[in-house]
Amino acid sequence: MERFEGNGRYHNVIRHNDLLFFSGQTATEAGNDLRGQTQMTLAKIDHLLEKYGSDRANILHADVYLREQEDVKVFNEVWDQWVPKGKEPTRACMIAKLGREPILVEIVIIAAVVGSKEK
């Protein structure tokens, strides 16, 4: 098992065998706009996937946390444009109080390493 980007409380990425486990990704620097936060969060996920040997097509599961029920429609519009058609992962979408007030969306993913062999 390899752990990356630790801060003393948690690691941002853990690789175990051919799986990557990512902590929750957010993008409050995008301002107080759900569409902007979602787009930036997904861009961060793209960066992390590439950095650790995967890509969007190899995401196995996503947990999506949104602050408000009415945010689901806008989130899905952005998500549907981002995720590769035919490669959609399993997904759960939850409405939750998030860790800090400015966070409107948080996404946790599990991905397979590109080129890994299924067992």
Image (tube, rainbow, N blue to C red):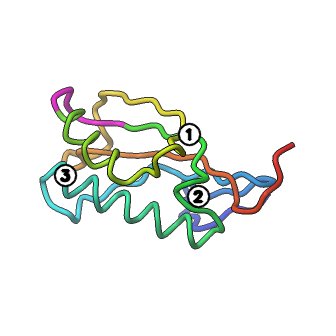
Amino acid at dot 3:
Arg
Horizontal side of 32 relative to 53 (left or right) equals left
Q: Is residue 14 above or below residue 86?
A: below
Pointer 3 local density, CA inside 10 Å: few below 14, some 14–19, many at least 20: many
Q: Is residue 80 above or below residue 5?
A: above
- Going from N to C along the chain, the mark reached first, 1 or 3, is 3
Question: Is residue 35 one of those drawn in magenta?
Answer: no
Comparing 99 with 69, the one in front is 69
**Residue in the picture at 19% in, 41% down:** 74
- Magenta range is 65-70
Under circle 2, the secondary element is strand
Horizontal side of 3 relative to 13 (left or right) equals right
Q: x, y (%) of residue 84?
A: 46, 52
**Residue in the picture at 34% in, 45% down:** 80
Q: Which of label 3 and label 2 is nearer to you?
A: 3
Amino acid at dot 1:
His
Under circle 1, the secondary element is strand
Residue beneath label 2, please? 11
Residue sticking out furthest to the front: 86
Q: x, y (%) of residue 11?
A: 58, 58
- Going from N to C along the chain, the mark reached first, 3 or 2, is 2
Residue beneath label 3, please? 35
**Residue 95: quarter of image:** top left
